[in-house]
Structures are given as structure tokens and as C-alpha cells.
Image: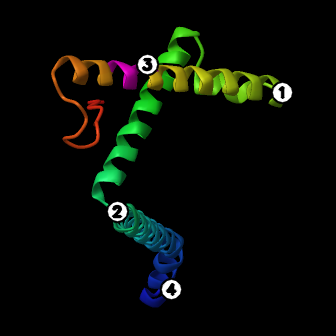
Amino acid sequence: MPISALAASAITALLPKAVDAVSKAVSGADAAAMKVADSKAKTKETLDAIRDKGIYQWAKEQQVEKLKEKIRAQVLAARGTSEGDLAKLDPKSRASTEASITEEIARRIKEAMLQELEHQAKSGKNGKQGPAIIDIKV
């Protein structure tokens, strides 16, 4: 077999692998670029929210959201269910269950806020020093 035929045969055999490798590299680069763009968008969204609401209000809302997530996980665990189980329910049952969970979350948050106010009252803080912050480390 002449050298040019041998080279052509080798190129033909290697070409699909090379195309596949380049394709994977490009798609990997595209995926990385998309992650960076998503991250930048989330950061911009967060900064815009902080600018609109102010750092104190934003932080307070973040604490409440974390508390809601924590309580939701506790409620689901207490009921012996998971997010996956909820997703499998028919729409009517799911709506009813979600409403019940939302009510329980609201009740527990109200209870936590009342406990915090009682604690402040007992410690001599009369509320004139600024708004109450419920410190929840999650």
C-alpha cells in the first residue's frame, strides 16, 4: 500500500474520533460558558434585589426563606414524606397537602417570632433599639 493510501486510511479511521473529541470539547466549553452566564445573572439579580430593598431587608428576607426551607424539611420528615412523594400525588391531593404544609410553616414562624419577642421583653429590650432579627443558623 502506498504511503498516501496508508495516510488516507489512518486519517479516515481517526477522523470520527477527532471530530467527537472536538465536539465534546466545544460542548464542554459551551456548558462552562452557560454556567458562567447563569452565575453572573444570579449575582446581578441578587445585587439588584439588595439595591432595591436595602441590605437589612434583603438579609431579613433571606433568613425567613432559609427558615421556611428548614421548617418545610422538618414538616415533611415528621409526616414521613419527601418532595418526590409530593410530586407523585394527583393535583388535588398535592394542593391540599401543600396548603397544610404552608399553614404549618406559617404557624411555626409565628411561634418563633413570638418566642423571640418574649425573649426580648425578658431581657429588657423594648424594641426601640431597632427591628428584631431572628437569628437562624441553617
Of helix, strand and loop, which one carries label 4? helix
Magenta stretch, overall SS: helix
Residue 67 seen in the current view: yes
- What is the number of the mark on residue 111? 3
- CB-based contact (under 8 Å), mark 1 and mark 2: no
Residue bearing the label numbered 2: 50
Q: Position of residue 94 (x, y in %)?
A: 75, 26
**Residue 5: which numbered mark, if any?**
4
Q: Earlier in the sequence, mark 1 or mark 3?
A: 1
Q: Secondary structure at mark 3?
A: helix
Question: Which amino acid is tagged 2?
Answer: Ile
Mark 4 belongs to which amino acid?
Ala
Q: Amino acid at mark 1?
A: Lys
Q: Quadrant of residue 115?
A: top left
87 displayed left or right of 70 = right
> Tag on residue 92?
1
Q: Nearer the viewer, mark 1 or mark 3?
A: 3
Amino acid under disc 3: Glu
Give the residues drawn in magenta, as a range.
111-115
Q: Quick check: marks 3 and 4 in contact, CB under 8 Å? A: no
- Judge whether 17 appears above or below 81 on screen: below
Asked whether, in this view, residue 17 is left or right of residue 81, the answer is left
Q: CA distance from mark 1 to mark 4?
A: 69 Å
Q: CA distance from mark 2 to mark 3?
A: 28 Å
